[in-house]
Image (cartoon, grey):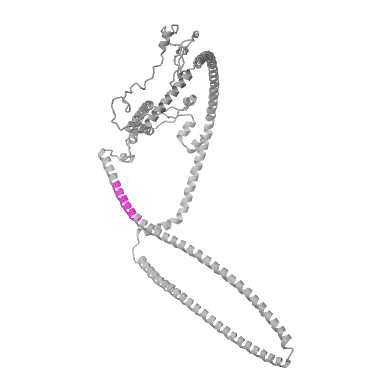
């Protein structure tokens, strides 16, 4: 209630006070229009009835063996049942339309001043809106003119849309060509990237191999250098020992003379070598300085060219900017002002005043909300006493309904227990009768099995199965002989229409005939005491075949009567014959 009251809805307030809300004429006509629309969409349109013309849905083939589950499964409704339900719904909708029309008639009688807006509600359609009907002239010519105007606007819009579609198609073609070009470029770039990656990998592998070879050569050179140094030191040591042991011991003056001149020659050679190395180092330094200076001058040439290009572009831009600025100043001071410029000036003057007006509006809104809250608080305090009385009355009604519900539930429980006791009693009686019938059927089945056992024992004692096996062996020998005869080459003769053998020219019409089995009538004629001779139904089928062993071959005497159970007649002697019917 507080939720509806906070929204300020009069209908919610009336509901909270326990009063029914009154329906306005507009709402009544809206309900009538809704009823007409529902009736048209669900019952008046022809296609609402087409679904009943199709074939009936077929049942599912995989039926469940459980009868309880089959009973609990929902059954599909037929077209007739759904049509009846549809017709009842149609009657309900018609009653609803009639009731809405009566309510609208009542409102027109009470408030005839609301006729025009109410009729406009009923007269609106998809293309005819309320504004068109409320314009004053609702004649068909006026409505047709408005519809024609809307149709022209729709045609114009369609024309613009078609032009836009053509333009979009053109752009689409261009975009597709551009995308195809980009796709081709992307493919080429991807292929180039793959090729570049492959080449980079091969170059990396080659570089790694070269680096490894260089490292190996450096290691070998270092090893050779160490070996050379060791060998030279060993040679010098050995030469010194040889000079000391062999040469310096004899001719010391000559040795000293030659040693001095050799030392002088060695010093001169080393001095010349040192001077040559100093000249080469000076030449290398001068060459290195000159090469660096040439590189710097070449780079400076490119920097000077790029700087010159940028300065020329900047000078041209400044000239164009000064020319455009001069043109704007001349256009500003030597032309009449436009309306938009005056509007701009007014907007600039309005900007300082706008925050103050916003604050005034906010203050007014806050004061209005405060007054509304105070009024709501007063009305809420006035509604508390009647609301408390209403709550007490509802609590008393709830307790009365609970008591009535408990009483009715006890009565239903008592009635259901009484019915369940009666049902149990009937079920017990039915179970007793069923047990009696089942015991009787069991006794009858036992007697039938005993009779069949006696017949089989008699046939085994008379060696009927041996005779049947003999006949079986004879038939197999004849079939074998016939099969061997068919394998022989036959003469090429014209087939005859007469049933004669193509080899011996004898008729073979009656070759496949067999002797007729002995009928039960012959046995009855031979035995006057048989019940068949009296014209009564036979007690047991007089068949000597293996079909007597089939559990479905029950004597008619063993069938239970439809009424109450009768006493079994005394057993009589049965006779049977056995014949080979296995073919």
Does the image show residue 536? no
Q: Position of residue 381 (x, y in %)?
A: 53, 34
Q: Residue at x 47, y 25 (%)?
A: 71
Q: Image quadrant of residue 143?
A: top left
Q: Is residue 18 left or right of residue 29?
A: right
Q: How many marks?
A: 0
Q: Please, is residue 69 above or below residue 448 in the view?
A: below
Given residues 354 and 143, the one toward you in this image is: 143
Does the image show residue 229? yes
Q: Position of residue 76 (x, y in %)?
A: 42, 28
In the image, farthest residue toward the front: 504
Q: In which quarter of the image is the C terminus?
A: top left
Q: Image quadrant of residue 547?
A: top left
Q: Please, is residue 292 above or below residue 419 in the view?
A: below
Q: Position of residue 455 (x, y in %)?
A: 49, 15
Queried whether the magenta region covers residue 45, the answer comes back as: no
Given residues 275 and 23, the one toward you in this image is: 275
Given residues 282 and 353, the one toward you in this image is: 282
What residue span does the magenta drawing correspond to?
153-171
Q: Is residue 257 left or right of residue 472?
A: right
In the image, farthest residue toward the left: 141
């Amino acid at each position: 209630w507080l939720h509806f009251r906070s929204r300020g809805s009069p209908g919610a307030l009336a509901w909270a006070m326990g009063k029914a809300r009154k329906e306005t004429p507009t709402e009544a006509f809206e309900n009538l229009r809704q009823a007409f629309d529902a009736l048209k969409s669900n019952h008046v349109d022809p296609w609402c009835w087409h679904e009943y013309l199709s074939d009936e849905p077929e049942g599912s083939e995989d039926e469940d063996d459980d009868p309880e589950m089959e009973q609990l499964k929902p059954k599909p409704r037929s077209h007739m049942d759904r049509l009846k339900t549809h017709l009842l719904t149609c009657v309900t909708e018609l009653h609803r339309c009639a009731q809405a029309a009566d309510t609208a008639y009542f409102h027109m009688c009470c408030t005839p001043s609301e006729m025009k807006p109410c009729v406009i509600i009923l007269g609106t359609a998809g293309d005819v809106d309320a504004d068109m009907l409320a314009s004053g002239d609702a004649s068909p010519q006026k409505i047709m003119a408005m519809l024609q105007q809307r149709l022209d606007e729709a045609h114009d819009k369609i024309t613009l849309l078609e032009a836009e579609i053509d333009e979009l198609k053109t752009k689409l073609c261009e975009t597709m060509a551009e995308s195809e070009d980009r796709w081709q470029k992307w493919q080429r770039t991807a292929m180039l990237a793959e090729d570049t990656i492959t080449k980079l990998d091969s170059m990396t592998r080659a570089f790694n191999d070269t680096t490894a070879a260089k490292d190996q050569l450096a290691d070998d050179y270092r090893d050779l250098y160490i070996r050379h140094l060791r060998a030279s030191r060993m040679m010098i040591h050995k030469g010194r020992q040889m000079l000391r042991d062999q040469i310096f011991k004899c001719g010391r003056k000559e040795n000293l003379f030659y040693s001095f001149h050799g030392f002088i020659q060695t010093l001169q050679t080393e001095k010349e070598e040192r001077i040559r190395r100093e000249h080469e180092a000076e030449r290398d330094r001068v060459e290195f300085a000159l090469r660096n200076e040439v590189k710097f001058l070449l780079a400076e040439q490119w920097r000077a060219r790029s700087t010159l290009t940028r300065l020329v572009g900047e000078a041209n831009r400044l000239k164009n900017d000064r020319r455009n600025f001069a043109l704007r100043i001349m256009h500003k001071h030597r032309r009449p002002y436009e309306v938009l410029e005056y509007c701009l000036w007014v907007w600039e003057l309005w900007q300082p005043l706008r925050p103050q007006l916003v604050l005034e509006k906010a203050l007014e809104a806050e004061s209005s909300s405060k007054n509304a809250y105070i009024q709501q608080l007063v009305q809420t305090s006035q509604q508390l006493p009647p609301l408390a009385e209403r709550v007490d009355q509802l609590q008393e009604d709830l307790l009365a309904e609970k008591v009535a519900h408990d009483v009715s539930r006890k009565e239903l429980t008592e009635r259901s227990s009484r019915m369940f006791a009666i049902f149990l009693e009937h079920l017990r009686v039915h179970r007793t009768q069923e047990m009696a019938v089942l015991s009787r059927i069991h006794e009858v089945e036992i007697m039938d099995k005993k009779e069949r056992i006696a017949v089989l024992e008699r046939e085994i004692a008379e060696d009927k199965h041996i005779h049947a096996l003999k006949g079986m062996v004879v038939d197999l020998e004849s079939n074998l002989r016939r099969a061997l005869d068919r394998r022989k080459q036959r003469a090429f003769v014209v087939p005859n229409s007469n049933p004669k053998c193509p080899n011996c020219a004898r008729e073979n019409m009656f070759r496949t005939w067999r002797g007729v089995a002995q009928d039960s009538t012959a046995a009855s004629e031979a035995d006057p005491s048989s019940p068949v001779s009296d014209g009564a139904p036979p007690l047991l089928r007089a068949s000597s075949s293996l079909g007597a062993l089939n559990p479905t071959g029950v004597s008619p005497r063993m069938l239970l009567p439809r009424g109450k159970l009768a006493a079994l007649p005394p057993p009589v002697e049965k006779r049977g014959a056995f014949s080979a019917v296995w073919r």
